[in-house]
Image (spheres, rainbow, N blue to C red):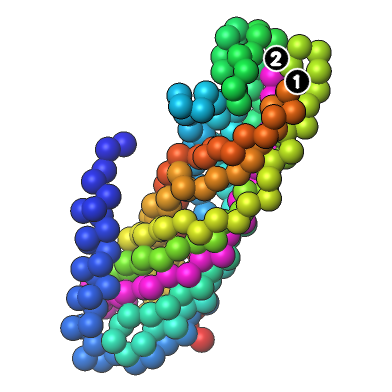
Amino acid sequence: MKIKFNHALTVVLVLLSSSLSFSAYAREWDYVGLSYKYRYMPGRSSTTYAYSTYEVLPKIYNGAEAFYAHRFESDVGLQLGYEQSRSEQRTHYFTNNEVFLGPTQHAGNYSVISNRIKAVQVDMVGFVDFLGHLEVIGQFGFSVMHAQMTGTLFANGVTTNLSPGKTYKAIPRFGLGLQYFFGKTPFGARFLGTWEGTNYYRMNLTDEDGIRHTIRPFKQSWCFTLGIVAKV
């Protein structure tokens, strides 16, 4: 999936700035919402540090996201959110000479890793009226993410606790979406597609020799949320 991130980010920033000129009938609003969140976040590989987590880590995460947003008269707002995914587990059987955390693995060795994503989000949000009750949303901000991971490696008859480190890391994020309110009611629906720079996340893992490795386990994330929103 080859997308020029600078172009997508430009669209978000244009929405945030252009919303300043669409405020003839604007007023301040507070929003609360709850959404289902789908996250595609595969593991990454590093030839420099000789590890691969692409096949070892779960790639798809299902969870929920709650948010509160304050929208100013300028149609620009500030949004705070919290995300928590379901704990996803993946078992991977290594092929002969496959590399994981430095040492090469033998056929029959395998790993069992579970991971849950928790994050607090802070975003600047812009709203542009599109068709009456339908609005385009652009957001840009950051997320303080924690990968709550547990892992075990079964290698050559020895069981090793990978002892994942408890790391909290700020990562960039931006997204585009739509928000629609039903008639004159304060209730509506919101859909967002978001890119998150989870490739900046770092954590520690221990190999079967007891050596601690600092790695960047994830590639970038593509996230989609769909849920309800209410004016309060």
Q: Is residue 39 left or right of residue 103?
A: left
Q: Main secondary structure of the magenta part?
A: strand
Q: On the image, numbered disc 1 is attached to which residue? A: 154
Using the image as rendered, state which of residue 187 and residue 38 is in the foreground.
38
- Going from N to C along the chain, the mark reached first, 2 or 1, is 2
Residue 35 location, x and y as percent?
53, 62
Disc 1 element:
strand
Q: Amino acid at mark 2?
A: Asn
Find out whether residue 125 is within the magenta segment: yes
Residue 145 location, x and y as percent?
56, 56
Q: Residue furthest front?
A: 211
Residue at image location 43% in from the left, 52% down from the top: 196
Q: Amino acid at mark 1?
A: Phe
Residue 124 in view here: yes
Residue 128 location, x and y as percent?
26, 75
Using the image as rendered, state which of residue 27 and residue 51 is in the foreground.
51
Q: Is residue 111 left or right of residue 8?
A: right
Magenta region, residue range = 110-133
> Cα distance, mark 2 to mark 1?
6 Å
Q: On the image, numbered disc 2 is attached to which residue? A: 109
**How many numbered marks, from 0 up?**
2
